[in-house]
Image: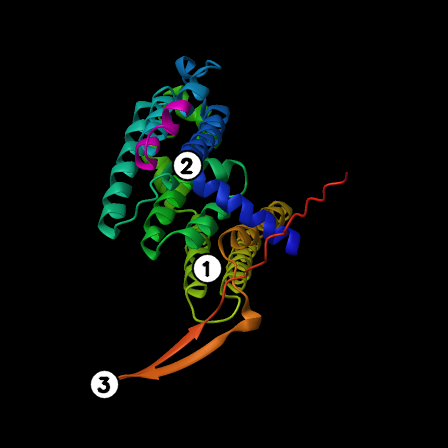
Amino acid sequence: MAKFIRTRGRIRRFYGQHEILLNRLFNGIFSFIVLLVLSRYFGFAKILSHAWVVPLLSVLCAFLPPSGSALVMQGYLLIQLMSVSFGVAVTMLVLFVLSYALCVGYQAHKFNNLVGITAWHRLHIPYLASMQTALLGGVQEVAAVVCGTVISFYMKEVYDNAALLKSGTDALSPIDLLRDNVFANPLFYIYLVAMAALFIMVYTIRTMNIRHAWTVAVTSGVVVEFILMLAGYLFVGQRSRIPELILANAVTFLIGVLTKYLVLDLDYTRVERVRFEDDEYYYYVTAVPKIRLEEEQKRVKRLS
């Protein structure tokens, strides 16, 4: 444990010394993963299917703020959808505009979730986005999570029905897809509630004044979301997706715990409670010290 804490301290110091460069690197890597998944599952436009397009756009995103990289990814997705159907692209554009309006109204800033959750959904780990946003963001980011969840479910239906949409027949229109396959699908509402419940549970508990709040938050959020999705799969008769759900929740839990250990380092064995007062109030303060280890002192012996 002591070795891990020292390693974590070195990682934090290294990050502090190269914060700007590393933030750009992480933004570029995130953009690359999302764009690669979009090109793999929604690569309908030949002009965007060249091998150099995704790396080039990822480098561009690395030098843009997160909101700028989100616009690049949304534009990439819209161009891909234009090759499926003009109506699908317009429908997605409307969803993006409504999502931005809701996010701005709630002062949410994680616009990457509007497309990012679609990528994680195709990788079968959409809950990871809700978990990380709740751990590292404010309560207002629930708007971005909800909007990204709606978009991801719609994009799943676009992927499943791409052949019909590209045929140009009246068998399935984009509005019919949105109405019948999304809003009339009970699994959509279960998925939406599960993602929102995971976020609210994790954010609420991690901000509470209890011991091991982050660990309890990660565990409780995963359990609540798992129960909701499990009930949903049983309700709609999709038992075959339960192993996938178990694996997705295991990954979400492990990354949530890893995030906790990288970000938070509180020593609950040395909690102190202090009371002091002034002329008008009594103040009760709970102080939880951070974990501190003495740096190893290296001794150099000279032999003559």
Q: Position of residue 122 (x, y in %)?
A: 51, 36
Q: Which residue is at 49% across, 15% downward?
A: 51
Of labels 2 and 3, earlier in sequence is 2
**In front: label 1 or label 3:** 3
The N terminus - image quarter: bottom right
Q: CA distance from mark 1 to mark 3?
A: 36 Å
Whether 137 is drawn above or below 58: the answer is: below
* Residue occupied by mark 2: 23
Q: Tell me which secondary structure the magenta stretch mostly adopts.
A: helix
**Element type at marker 3?**
loop
| Residue 67 belongs to magenta span | yes
| Residue occupying image coordinates x 50% and y 62% | 290
Q: What residue does disc 3 label?
A: 280
In terms of secondary structure, where does tag 2 sit?
A: helix
Q: Are marks 1 and 2 in contact (CB under 8 Å)?
A: no
Pointer 1 or 3: first along the chain: 1
| Magenta stretch bounds | 59-69
The disc labelled 1 sits on which kind of residue? Val
Which type of secondary structure does the marked residue at label 1 adopt?
helix
Q: Nearer the viewer, residue 302 or 27?
A: 302
> Is residue 44 in sight in this rendering?
no
Foreground: 29 or 301?
301
Which marked residue is nearer to the observer: mark 1 or mark 2? Answer: 2
Label 1: how many residues lie within 10 Å, few (<14), some (14-19) or many (20+)?
many
Q: Residues within 10 Å of mark 3 (few under 14, many from 20)?
A: few
Q: Residue at x 35, y 53 (%)?
A: 142
Residue 133 image point, x, y percent: 42, 49
Determine which residue is flagged by label 1: 202
Say if mark 2 contacts mark 3, CB within 8 Å. no
